[in-house]
Image: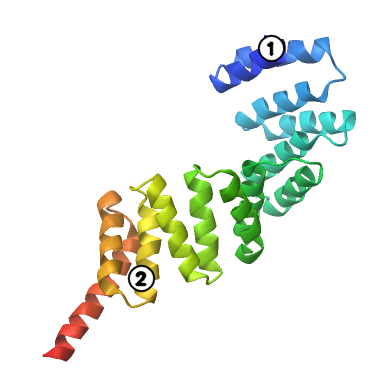
Amino acid sequence: MGKMETGIEYLKEHKFEEAARAFTEAIDEDPSNPVGYINFGNLLLHLNDFERAKTFYEKAIELDEHASTAYYGLGNMYYEQDKFKEAQEYFEKAVHEGLENGDIYFMLGMTLVQQEKSRFALPYLQRAAELNLQDVDAQFQYGLALAQSQQIDLAMEQMKEVLKLENEHSDAHYNLGVGYLYYADVEKALHHFNEALRIQPDHVLAGNGKEKVQEMLNQNTNDND
């Protein structure tokens, strides 16, 4: 196993000093290889050392202007600092340079969500969901973007897909409750609000939804008397 692979393994194991040593040795052995700088940038990003991470990513780009994972790293760096417009720009550059996986589309979609541009986020989150079929977050965020784009039926179907992956997903239950409430199916709405509260008793939105349903049921009872 080479120094680079060793460093990546250490990083996965959260052995940061060992990872730094391995990446430093890899850079010393081949200073013209951008991958060493990208991996060191990833380590620094993991440690929230944003300024130094930026330096390493920029060095990688200086060596190879098409280094897509360096642009991805810079996107993550800006995202972690809540600088979503800058993050979006670098994620778009990463895609332009050929990075093609579920994570890049997910992060690009999330930068747009954070900028309250859910309609523009939708195709990216859809692609992320298609590429990461077992990723609960990708599936859920796609469903949420559908709901925010007023595609209620598709959003509800997507939330059901989330629950197939993780039945104890309180937010998926809550959003299904909202969907059924939209169609005035109060019994199913109440069921999903109750499930959300069973899983997460302090789920404020589910609690509010349940109160609204109970008011509707009480009103129906009074009207029938």
Residue in the image at 76% along x and 50% along y: 89
Residue 32: where, in percent of width, then height? 88, 20
Q: State the separation of the CA atoms marked 1 and 2.
A: 54 Å
* Foreground of the two, 59 or 110: 110
- Can residue 50 be seen in the rendering of this structure? yes
Among the two numbered marks 1 and 2 on one chain, the one whose residue lies closer to the N terminus: 1
Q: Assess whether mark 2 and mark 1 are in contact (beta carbons under 8 angstroms).
A: no
- Of badges 1 and 2, nearer the viewer stands 2
Q: Which residue has dot 1 on it?
A: 22
Q: Residues within 10 Å of mark 2 (few under 14, many from 20)?
A: many
Quadrant of the image occupied by residue 5: top right
Residue 200: where, in percent of width, then height? 30, 51
Please state, as top left, top right, bottom left or bottom right, where the N terminus lies in the image: top right
Q: Which residue has dot 2 on it?
A: 180
Residue in the image at 67% along x and 50% along y: 108
| Callout 1 amino acid | Ala
